[in-house]
Amino acid sequence: MGRKIVSVIAGYIIFVITALALFKFSGQKPHADPTTTFVILTAIYGAVTSFIAGLVTQMISRTKSLIINYILAFIIAGFATFSLVKSAGNHWTQLLAIIIFAPASIVGGLIYNKKNT
């Protein structure tokens, strides 16, 4: 049980730190209006890092079940939904997290399991 909790925390930390790094180094404000190019690059970057978060979650948990990845995806989408409701400004980052990043974390776990079965 402890390993599974740690795996979800590790996956979420990967997701958050890489997202914060993107905005820190790009200078783009998360709730400001972005350019179309930046949205596309963010979608790709976020999908890749969420996929990696899903892989790491599965690797640490050492389980063949995707339930742990569904929990990670729920947490990613849950915080994004909360932010969507509570924050002002453009909500493009929250929508990407709900529509692309959360599912990508599940795909990461699925691919990890398929390669290690």
Image (tube, rainbow, N blue to C red):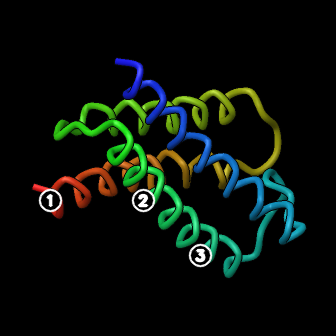
The residue lying toward the viewer, choosing from 10 and 73, is 10
Left or right: where does residue 46 sit relative to residue 23? left
Of circles 3 and 1, the one toward us is 1
Distance from label 3 to label 1 (Cα)? 28 Å
Residue 93, image x, y percentages: 66, 53
Where 11 falls versus 83 (above or below)?
below
Q: Quadrant of residue 24?
A: bottom right
Pick whichever of labels 2 and 3 is earlier in the sequence: 3
Binning the other alpha carbons within 10 Å of mark 1 as few (below 14), some (14 to 19) or many (20 upward) gives: few
Binning the other alpha carbons within 10 Å of mark 3 as few (below 14), some (14 to 19) or many (20 upward) gives: few
Distance from label 2 to label 3 (Cα)? 16 Å
- Residues tagged 2 and 3 counted as in contact (Cβ below 8 A): no
In the rendered image, which residue does mark 3 sit on? 40
User: Hey, what amino acid is under mark 1?
Assistant: Lys
Of circles 2 and 1, the one toward us is 1
The residue positioned farthest toward the left in the image shown: 117
- Residues tagged 2 and 1 counted as in contact (Cβ below 8 A): no
Pick whichever of labels 2 and 1 is earlier in the sequence: 2
Residue at figure coordinates x 38%, y 41% from the top left: 60
User: Hey, what amino acid is under mark 2?
Assistant: Phe
User: Hey, what amino acid is under mark 3?
Assistant: Ile
Left or right: where does residue 13 sit relative to residue 28? left
In the rendered image, which residue does mark 2 sit on? 51
In the rendered image, which residue does mark 1 sit on? 114
Binning the other alpha carbons within 10 Å of mark 2 as few (below 14), some (14 to 19) or many (20 upward) gives: many
Does dot 1 land on a helix, a strand or a loop?
helix
Q: Quadrant of residue 107?
A: bottom left
Does dot 2 land on a helix, a strand or a loop?
helix
